[in-house]
């Protein structure tokens, strides 16, 4: 199979796309579990399609452009995981083709082939959570576009008008996934060390990056959501986090093989002496990519393989050398087939858990579990006070307090007059039919806001209140 990918023509590109579709086939044949963040993205889009404003009427840490995409997805398809997967598949195909074209068209590898795209396809399929339309996937699309501009600059070793365009792409990537802002410094460092750039070029990068951010900030400000946006986005990114060790372990197991072949490819690349100067400069630029991508790790909200999609361009770049520089092509073919088998095994294991014992790649702590709720609470507007454990899976959210992690400090601060007013207004604007109180908060709310006590009464189920 690897021998087929050594060519570079329209037939080989078509074969590359078919190869990727076959790898992704298990995600459509098996029921892919919905993850907690994935359900949150769907709920945010659902609320926005009802006319509520992100950050002002919906408290969630999803970035602005990602929220806009989920809004459009809900308008077109409703709450559909299948639609998420299809759109993610289209984006992934674009990334694979663009990544391969960018490096091959500028002769950044010793030979022209679709091997870089084939490796990128494998890396994008190592875990089932990469098949969904995540902010990280959307953001990486624009990071790749910025990378394309950098490849052109490094090849010429002269900064051109591409720098402003690269800034636009970095700013847009940031609006899809906030930690992507770190790649602004990757652009600056790459221009500084590996091109001839003037002060004007650096200013254009800064201007291009700032332009989409300032425009989005203006829209948020005009919607009177500036303060809540700061609370929702920036506080959630910079807060000290306690990561789940099981999720970390699952992520490390899933990423072990991709990282290994990336390291082996890097080592093989450094021992080769048949590179031109511009190829060596690009290799150093991609090494910088890994370094700056690593700086984004502390800002991640949780651990899952999809959170590390921004590493894939660099890993695929270095892993390509592992196969292109192979002296024994039969041995390389066997290695490539082994990696395919490992990828498919991790997929099936993550989806089905076909092996007994522990489940290290199933992301069990991130899966939405079906909550045990009374039959009456189905397809209702609800508010969950406490961590969501699947209550929203077959229900709609009400009030802005979608993300409990963000809302908890606010909701529990009932001695603050502004908090009390906000809670009262939120219940009036978007009243839930049921309140599922898992932290015994409603009695305190009723004490502070007697008007709400008239509207809600306890049910026969502990901690559940129904609207009169």
Image (spheres, rainbow, N blue to C red):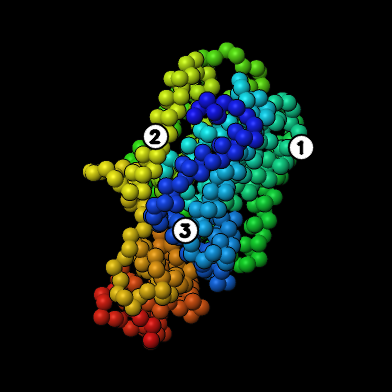
Identify which residue is drawn at 56% across, 40% down.
Answer: 17
**Residue at (51% x, 78% y) in the render:** 429
In the image, taking residue 108 as reference, residue 332 lies left or right, namely left
The answer to whether mark 2 and mark 3 are in CB contact below 8 A is no
Left or right: 278 as drawn, with respect to 458: right
Q: Residues within 10 Å of mark 1 (few under 14, many from 20)?
A: few
> Mark 3 falls on what kind of element?
helix
Mark 2, residue position: 341
Given residues 32 and 259, the one toward you in this image is: 32
- Dividing the picture into quadrants, the one containing residue 203 is top right
Of residues 320 and 206, the one drawn nearer to the viewer in this rendering: 320
Residue contact between numbered discs 1 and 3, judged by CB atoms under 8 Å? no
The residue where tag 3 is placed is 81
Q: Position of residue 109 (x, y in %)?
A: 60, 23
**What residue sits right under mark 1 in the picture?**
161
SS for dot 2? helix
Earlier in the chain: of badge 2 and badge 3, it is: 3
Cα separation, mark 1 vs mark 2, equals: 44 Å
Mark 2: give few (<14), some (14-19) or many (20+) Cα within 10 Å. Answer: few
Near-viewer residue (4 or 364)? 4
- Residue 48, percent from left and from top: 55, 67
Q: Quadrant of the C terminus?
A: bottom left
Q: Residue at x 70, y 26 (%)?
A: 155
The secondary element bearing badge 1 is classed as: loop
Q: Between marks 1 and 3, how big is the CA–CA gap?
A: 40 Å
Please provide percent x and percent y for residue 346: 37, 40
Relative to 175, does residue 114 appear above or below in the rendering?
A: above
């Amino acid at each position: 199979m690897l021998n087929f990918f050594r060519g570079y023509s329209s037939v080989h590109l078509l074969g590359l796309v078919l190869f990727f579709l076959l790898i992704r086939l298990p995600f459509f044949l098996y029921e892919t579990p919905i993850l907690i963040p994935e359900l949150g993205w769907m709920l945010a889009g659902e609320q926005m399609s009802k006319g509520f404003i992100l950050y002002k009427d919906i408290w969630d840490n999803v970035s602005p452009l990602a929220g806009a995409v989920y809004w459009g997805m809900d308008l077109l398809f409703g709450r559909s995981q299948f639609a998420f997967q299809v759109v993610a598949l289209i984006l992934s195909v674009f990334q694979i083709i663009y990544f391969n074209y960018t490096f091959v068209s500028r002769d950044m590898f010793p030979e022209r082939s679709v091997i870089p795209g084939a490796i990128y396809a494998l890396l994008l399929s190592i875990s089932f959570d990469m098949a969904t339309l995540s902010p990280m996937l959307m953001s990486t699309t624009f990071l790749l576009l910025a990378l394309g501009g950098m490849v052109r600059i490094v090849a010429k070793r002269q900064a051109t008008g591409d720098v402003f365009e690269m800034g636009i792409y970095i700013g847009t990537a940031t609006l899809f996934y906030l930690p992507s802002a770190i790649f602004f410094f990757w652009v600056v460092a790459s221009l500084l060390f590996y091109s001839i750039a003037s002060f004007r070029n650096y200013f254009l990068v800064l201007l291009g990056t700032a332009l989409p951010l300032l425009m989005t900030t203006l829209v948020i400000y005009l919607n009177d959501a500036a303060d809540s946006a700061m609370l929702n986005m920036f506080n959630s990114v910079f807060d000290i986090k306690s990561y789940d060790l099981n999720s970390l372990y699952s992520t490390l197991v899933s990423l072990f093989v991709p990282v290994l072949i990336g390291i082996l490819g890097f080592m093989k690349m450094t021992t080769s002496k048949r590179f031109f100067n511009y190829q060596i400069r690009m290799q150093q630029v991609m090494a910088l990519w890994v370094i700056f991508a690593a700086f984004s790790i502390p800002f991640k909200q949780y651990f899952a393989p999809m959170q590390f999609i921004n590493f894939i361009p660099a890993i695929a770049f270095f892993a390509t050398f592992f196969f292109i520089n192979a002296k024994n092509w039969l041995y390389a073919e066997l290695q490539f087939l082994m990696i395919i088998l490992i990828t498919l095994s991790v997929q099936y294991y993550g989806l089905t858990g076909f092996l007994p014992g522990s489940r290290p790649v199933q992301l069990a702590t991130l899966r939405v579990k079906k909550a045990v709720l009374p039959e009456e609470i189905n397809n209702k507007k609800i508010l969950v006070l406490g961590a969501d454990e699947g209550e929203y899976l077959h229900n709609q959210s009400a009030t802005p307090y979608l993300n409990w992690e963000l809302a908890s400090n606010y909701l529990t601060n009932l001695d603050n007059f502004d908090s009390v007013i906000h809670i009262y207004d939120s219940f009036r604007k978007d009243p839930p039919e049921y309140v599922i109180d898992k932290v015994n908060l409603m009695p305190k709310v009723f004490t502070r806001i007697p008007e709400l006590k008239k509207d809600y009464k306890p049910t026969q189920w502990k901690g559940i209140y129904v609207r009169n």
